């Protein structure tokens, strides 16, 4: 892997931890995030290694902002997209669903397509998208989130297949986290919660090996595939059951 990495959504959660770890290792890291105060806090810790840009993935001109930071870094070789939102929406509120789709689908595609064309012009590159175990099946409590993660997963696979067919030297990696102890770890059936440091270390290993897909942590491979194989009547009963696990506070 080269020493120039751009992380979209690098001010919190897994994105922040990856930003810090790569900077500690001497990589040049660009971070795009919505909250300027958090961007500055991270940059102050590694002033020689980190460049920042305040931007929202929902902005229509996010592609231009990504390109501007890439140029400020004198180019990149790796782009990691961690930015996403999750909202529990039992009432199926319209605004909440559309906000999720805007961020996790529209914003996601804008960033990925921008990176794709940049790496095409460069002649090589590595795109990493962070999806979720939620991509496996639908969920009554967060329909748009689960659907958007399924979209992201399919989109990344499509680009990986396309890159291989076109022989354009672009690697595509999908990181598939289960529950990580971050602000996004919501719900009342939380289990196998991983700390963010462990999740970031496993993510870095998968990225360095240019894995096509990697479950974070590895045990979530089992849960994902069990969910995919469950008949509808069993899955429906499981999702509508009254059993509860520890709620994250």
Image (tube, rainbow, N blue to C red):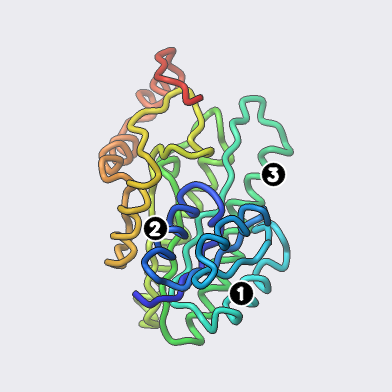
**Which residue is located at x 34 percent, y 35 percent?**
227
Residue 231 location (% of width, % of height): 33, 30
The quarter of the picture where residue 43 lies is bottom right
**Which residue is located at x 57 percent, y 59 percent?**
108
Q: Is residue 152 left or right of residue 56?
A: left
Residue 213 location (% of width, % of height): 32, 57
Q: Residues within 10 Å of mark 2 (few under 14, many from 20)?
A: many
Q: CA distance from mark 2 to mark 3?
A: 24 Å
Kindly give the residue lying farthest to the top in the view shown: 242
Q: Nearer the viewer, mark 2 or mark 1?
A: 1
Q: First in sequence: mark 1 or mark 3?
A: 1
The residue wearing badge 3 is 98
Q: First in sequence: mark 2 or mark 1?
A: 1
Q: Residues within 10 Å of mark 3 (few under 14, many from 20)?
A: few
The residue wearing badge 2 is 174
**Are the residues flagged by discs 2 and 3 in contact, CB closer than 8 Å?**
no
Q: Is residue 16 left or right of residue 243?
A: right
Residue 234 location (% of width, % of height): 35, 24
Residue 78 location (% of width, % of height): 44, 72
Which quadrant of the figure contains the N terminus? bottom left
Q: CA distance from mark 2 to mark 1?
A: 23 Å
The local secondary structure at tag 1 comes to helix
Label annotation for residue 69 = 1
Q: Nearer the viewer, residue 237 or 79?
A: 79
Q: Nearer the viewer, mark 2 or mark 3?
A: 2
Q: Is residue 48 left or right of residue 57?
A: left
């Amino acid at each position: 892997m080269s020493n120039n990495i751009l992380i979209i959504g690098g001010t919190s959660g897994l994105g922040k931890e990856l930003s810090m770890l790569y900077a500690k290792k001497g990589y040049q890291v660009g971070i795009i995030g919505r909250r300027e105060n958090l961007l500055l806090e991270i940059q102050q810790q590694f002033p020689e290694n980190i460049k920042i840009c305040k931007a929202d993935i929902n902005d229509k001109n996010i592609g231009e902002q990504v390109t501007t930071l890439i140029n400020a870094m004198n180019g990149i070789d790796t782009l990691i997209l961690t930015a996403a939102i999750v909202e529990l929406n039992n009432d199926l509120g319209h605004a909440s669903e559309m906000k999720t789709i805007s961020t996790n689908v529209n914003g996601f595609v804008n960033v990925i397509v921008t990176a794709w064309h940049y790496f095409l012009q460069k002649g090589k590159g590595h795109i990493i998208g962070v999806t979720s175990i939620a991509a496996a099946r639908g969920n009554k409590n967060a329909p748009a989130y689960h659907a958007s993660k399924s979209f992201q997963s399919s989109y990344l696979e499509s680009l990986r297949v396309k890159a291989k067919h076109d022989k354009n030297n672009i690697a595509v990696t999908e990181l598939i986290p289960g529950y990580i102890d971050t602000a996004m770890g919501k719900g009342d059936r939380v289990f196998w919660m991983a700390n963010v440091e462990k999740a970031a270390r496993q993510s870095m290993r998968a990225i360095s090996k240019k894995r096509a897909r990697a479950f974070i942590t590895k045990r979530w491979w089992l849960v994902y595939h069990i969910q995919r194989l469950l008949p509808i009547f069993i899955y429906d009963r499981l999702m509508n059951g009254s059993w509860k696990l520890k709620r994250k506070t």
